[in-house]
Amino acid sequence: MFSRRALIAAGLSTLVLSPLSSFAAELPDLGGKTVVVVTENAYPPLQFVDPKSGQAIGWEYDAMNEIAKRLNFKVEYQNTSWDAMIQAVSDGQYQIGMTGITIKDDRKEKVDFSDPYMRSEQFMLVRGDETRFTDGKSFGAFNDGLVGAQPGTTPFYTAVYEILDGNESNPRIKLFETFGATVQALKTGDVDVVLTDGTAGKGYVDASNGGLKLIGGPLGSEDFGFIFPKGSDLVAPVNAAIAVLKADGTLDGLNKKWFLDYKMGE
C-alpha cells in the first residue's frame, strides 16, 4: 500500500462535499445494533495507542464514534494486522475496516469502500530562507539535499518515488521516529526538506514566524475510505453520515484536533 503508514503526523485535508441542508434529519436509524469495526492502531494520528494513557485514540476513532452516534449503532472495536485486514473484512469477519486505507480499484474487487472521508496531498516544507531549490524536480537535482521522513509513511514513499530515484535505501533520506523530530531536524539544518500534507504544513508555517514555508505544488494525492464486505448494507448509511459530518464542520474540527493541535510525542 503506497500510504501504508501514511501521515504519522502529516495532516490531511477532508474532501470538499456539497453542502447539505437539513440532511441530518434524514439519516437512517440503525436501531442501536452492534457493528464490529476492525483497525490496526498503528497509524497515528488516525488510530494508535496513546503511550501516556494506553488508550486507543485518533482521528478515525473520533469520526467512527460520531458516525455511530448519528446513525444510532454501537461500535465494537477489534484489532488485526494490516496484512490480514482487507481479506478478513472481505470474508465477513468484521463489518467495517478503518486504517487509512487508500481507495484502489484492485481492492474494490474484494471489498466495498465508503465515499472518501479524507484526501492527502503532500507538499514540501522547507526553511523560510531556502533558495537552493523550488520544487521536487530541482530538489532531486540538488544532490546535497537531505529529506527527513519516517519509514513506511506516505511522505517517505513520496520522497523515494516522486522526488528521488526510487531507491528506498537512498542515503539522502534521513529517518526519524516522529514527524515532530523531522520538523525539528529541518529547523536545525540537519535535513533540507520534510514532506507533509498541506493542512499540517500550513499550521507549521503559520506558527513559525517566517522560519518555514511550503514550496512547489502537490506531489500527488490519495483518497481514504472505510471498507466493508461486498454488498454491505452499511455502506449507504455511512456515506450519508460522512457527508453530514463534512457539511456541519465536524471533520474540519477533527482535522484541527489531530493534525494541528495534538502533539504526537513531541
Image (spheres, rainbow, N blue to C red):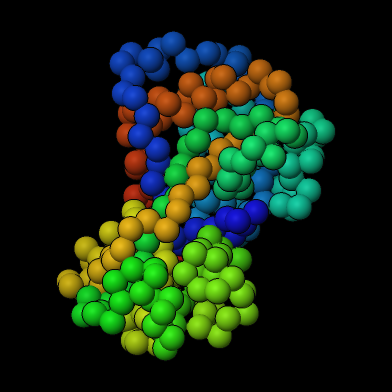
- Left or right: 165 as drawn, with respect to 133: right
Residue 203 position in % (x across, y down): 28, 60
Residue 50 position in % (x across, y down): 55, 60
Residue plotted at (36% across, 74% down): 138
- Left or right: 167 as drawn, with respect to 162: right
Number of marks drawn: 0
Q: Quadrant of residue 226?
A: top right
Instruction: Examine the rendered structure and indicate whether residue 231 appears above or below residue 169.
Output: above
- Left or right: 93 as drawn, with respect to 199: right
Residue plotted at (42% across, 26% down): 243
Residue plotted at (61% across, 14% down): 31
Name, please, the residue furthest toward the left: 209
Residue 35 position in % (x across, y down): 67, 28
Instruction: Examine the rendered structure and indicate whether residue 8 appears above or below residue 247.
Output: below
Residue plotted at (22% across, 76% down): 128
The answer to which of 111 and 23 lies nearer the viewer is 111
The quadrant of the rendering that contains the N terminus is bottom right
- Can residue 1 be seen here? The reply is yes
Residue 131 position in % (x across, y down): 24, 80
- Can residue 185 be seen here? The reply is no
The quadrant of the rendering that contains the C terminus is bottom left
